[in-house]
């Protein structure tokens, strides 16, 4: 069984879509291939990879309540390719969005289902994840914390001769526990999706989110995006921005 994971984020690295695709891949058995779908230049290679695939998993961000515009030309090309080649593919979708409610991905799922019907391939359902930006930030932070913990262990080992200093390890495990609790819905629904891929079963449509009450999420999101806006020169557009309007 061959499964192709398509990271449809336009980001070249550290995308939430790429992360969830990789996480799902961990639980999927058989031959797996992860590919980027960013520009027209990727289309040919992706279609070539789909020739002997059984399953394709589109992992994508939600843009303006729908499928990102750079993915649409690929869907048009793939629809034609499916009609010509009748590949008998099973299609799953993982969509993530910035707002906290995973259900915001419903319209994207409908577009992808219609695409499958028109292309004559099997729509097997999808997972919509709310709080995708936060999920992405959390997984990057936990890797940074892991690196810092290893560094602190090494320094304290050299300075004091005590190795390992358990306080640092407990501190990291606490951070990890917080991340796992906030991400438990995403992890559970993702493992379920992977098990459907393995069993060649329909998954249906399911929506999950970061396990944080919305009013707390909004406060964190406001602080995060205010900082990002200041750093990127966007809060008072034009005042801090290095970019001149074209
Ligand atoms: C142009 C654009 C449009 C977006 N539209 C929405 C939207 O309609 N609803 C939403 O919840 N998030 C929206 N987002 C946020 C993205 O879905 C979110 O940042 C996602 O986690 C990005 O995933 P990625 O890292 O895989 O690219 C939008 C982001 C961009 C850049």
Image (cartoon, helix red, strand yellow):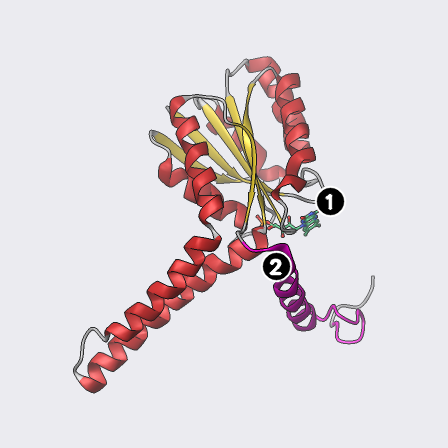
Predominant SS along the magenta part = helix
Identify the element where label 1 is drawn. Answer: loop
Q: Which residue is mark 2?
A: 217
The residue positioned farthest toward the left in the image shown? 161
Identify the element where label 2 is drawn. Answer: helix
Q: Could you tell me which quadrant the N terminus lies in? A: top left
Residue 135 is at least partly visible in this image: yes
Question: Which is nearer the eye, 129 or 230?
Answer: 129
Q: Position of residue 24 (x, y in %)?
A: 43, 39
119 on left or right of 245: left
Position of residue 179 relative to residue 66, above or below, is below
The residue positioned farthest toward the right in the image shown? 246
The residues colored magenta run: 212-241
Image point 54% across, 13% down: which residue?
Answer: 86
> Is 89 included in the stretch rendered in magenta?
no
Image point 28% across, 74% down: which residue?
Answer: 167
Image point 40% across, 38% down: which residue?
Answer: 25
Question: Which is nearer the eye, 18 or 38?
Answer: 18
Q: Position of residue 166 (x, y in %)?
A: 24, 72
Residue 71 is at least partly visible in this image: no
Position of residue 118 relative to residue 194, above or below, is above
152 on left or right of 239: left
Q: Position of residue 176 (x, y in %)?
A: 38, 60
Determine if the C-beta at disc 1 is less than 8 A from ligand 1: yes
Q: Earlier in the sequence, mark 1 or mark 2?
A: 1
Q: Could you tell me which quadrant the C terminus lies in? A: bottom right
Task: Give residue 192's quadrant in the image.
Answer: top left
Label at residue 64? 1
Q: Position of residue 16 (x, y in %)?
A: 53, 50
> Is 228 included in the stretch rendered in magenta?
yes
């Amino acid at each position: 069984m061959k499964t192709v994971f398509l990271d449809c984020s336009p980001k070249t690295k550290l995308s939430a879509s790429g992360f969830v695709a990789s996480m799902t891949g961990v639980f999927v058995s058989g031959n797996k291939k992860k590919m980027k779908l960013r520009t027209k230049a990727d289309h040919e290679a992706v279609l070539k990879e789909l020739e002997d695939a059984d399953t394709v998993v589109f992992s994508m961000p939600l843009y303006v309540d729908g499928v990102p515009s750079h993915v649409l030309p690929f869907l048009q090309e793939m629809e034609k390719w499916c009609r010509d080649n009748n590949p008998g593919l099973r299609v799953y979708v993982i969509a993530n969005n910035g707002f906290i409610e995973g259900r915001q991905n419903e319209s994207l799922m409908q577009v992808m289902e219609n695409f499958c019907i028109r292309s004559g391939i099997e729509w097997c359902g999808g997972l919509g994840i709310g709080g995708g930006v936060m999920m992405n930030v959390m997984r990057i932070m936990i890797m940074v914390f892991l690196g810092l913990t290893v560094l602190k262990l090494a320094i304290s080992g050299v300075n004091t001769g005590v190795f390992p200093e358990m306080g640092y390890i407990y501190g990291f495990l606490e951070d990890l526990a917080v991340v796992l609790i906030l991400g438990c819905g995403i992890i559970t629904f993702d493992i379920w999706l992977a098990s459907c891929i393995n069993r060649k079963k329909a998954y249906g449509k399911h929506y999950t989110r970061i396990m944080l009450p919305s009013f707390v999420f909004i406060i964190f999101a406001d602080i995060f995006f205010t900082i990002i806006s200041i750093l990127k020169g966007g809060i008072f557009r034009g005042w801090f921005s290095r970019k001149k309007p074209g």
